[in-house]
Image (spheres, rainbow, N blue to C red):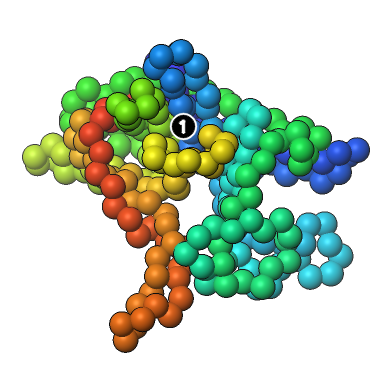
């Protein structure tokens, strides 16, 4: 069975007229499937980086600094900047040089921001679905590349989502034969979101599970810090737990 080789898969944006280009490794994928129409769209989480003055002959690191990451599809994207201290909501922030004190999300169409956005997806030539705990433990301890797939469904909207991601952290026992995935980041659809673009309707998350039919996401959300009964400020971190029932599948690649 085919699986994405995330170590060799990239998003590259190209500026207009030979402007700045950036190649960024992919961290995870999520395919949204409309069950009524059969239409599928896949979105990819890019690896995070830090705020920088690109191609400068002076200082390179922007201060105050922030975490820069994004989600990209074939036609649309969202750029997410998370500052040292954030307000409870993501706010539009088109500028690079910020004053901190908030997190911002900037959605848009790829063609409106860059000359071209290219998604280069490499796949393992073969992949074996791991059916038993013993297979998972043996392949883990043999240092084989592992890819996870989680499928969840929203009955109200008739939408399915297939999440695909590299297994970066795997916990195993020999006696009894057990495993537990704890990995991320990945992207999880927020089925209740009213965002205009599909790319706005995702949470960044980690996933934890040890059985094939259920698990837990921990979502990266703004969180108020309370002291003395009143909110002082908020931070953006992995703070909201969401249980799910669905299908978890592990593949050994290569």
Comparing 98 with 61, the one in front is 98
Residue 162 found in image quarter = top left
Left or right, 37 with respect to 241, comes to right
Q: Residue at x 69, y 36 (%)?
A: 109
Left or right, 195 with respect to 148, comes to right
The answer to whether residue 249 is seen in the rendering is no
Q: Is residue 34 above or below residue 113?
A: above
Whole-percent x, y for residue 246 in the image: 26, 30
Q: Residue at x 42, y 57 (%)?
A: 221
Left or right, 18 with respect to 86, comes to right
The answer to whether residue 94 is seen in the rendering is yes
State the quadrant of the N terminus. top left
Q: Name the residue at the top extreme.
A: 37
Whole-percent x, y for residue 47 in the image: 56, 47
Residue corresponding to mark 1: 30
State the quadrant of the C terminus. top left
Task: Decide: few, some or many residues near mark 1? Use Cα within 10 Å; few <14, some 14-19, many ≥20.
Answer: many
- The count of marks equals 1
Q: Residue at x 45, y 68 (%)?
A: 235
Left or right, 99 with respect to 48, comes to right
Q: Is residue 133 above or below residue 170?
A: above
Q: Is residue 168 above or below residue 83?
A: above
Comparing 94 with 215, the one in front is 94
Comparing 121 with 224, the one in front is 224
């Amino acid at each position: 069975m085919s699986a994405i080789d995330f170590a060799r898969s990239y998003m590259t944006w190209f500026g207009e007229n030979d402007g700045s280009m950036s190649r960024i490794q992919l961290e995870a994928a999520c395919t949204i499937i409309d069950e009524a129409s059969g239409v599928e769209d896949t979105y990819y989480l890019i690896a995070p980086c830090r705020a920088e003055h690109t191609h400068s002959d002076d200082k390179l690191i922007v201060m105050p600094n922030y975490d820069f990451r994004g989600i990209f599809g074939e036609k649309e994207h969202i750029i997410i900047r998370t500052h040292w201290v954030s307000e409870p909501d993501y706010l539009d922030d088109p500028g690079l040089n910020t004053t901190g004190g908030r997190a911002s999300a900037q959605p848009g169409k790829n063609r409106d921001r860059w000359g071209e956005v290219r998604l280069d997806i490499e796949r393992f030539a073969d992949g074996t679905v791991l059916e038993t705990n013993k297979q998972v433990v043996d392949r883990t301890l043999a240092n084989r590349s592992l890819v996870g797939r989680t499928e969840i469904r929203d009955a109200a909207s008739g939408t399915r989502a297939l999440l695909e991601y590299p297994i970066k952290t795997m916990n195993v026992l020999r006696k009894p034969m057990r495993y537990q995935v704890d990995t991320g980041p990945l992207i999880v659809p927020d089925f209740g979101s009213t965002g205009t673009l599909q790319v706005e309707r995702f949470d960044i998350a980690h996933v934890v599970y040890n059985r094939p039919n259920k698990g837990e996401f921990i979502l990266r959300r703004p969180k108020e810090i309370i002291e003395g009964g009143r909110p002082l400020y908020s931070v953006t971190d992995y703070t909201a737990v969401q249980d799910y029932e669905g299908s978890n599948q592990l593949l050994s690649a290569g």
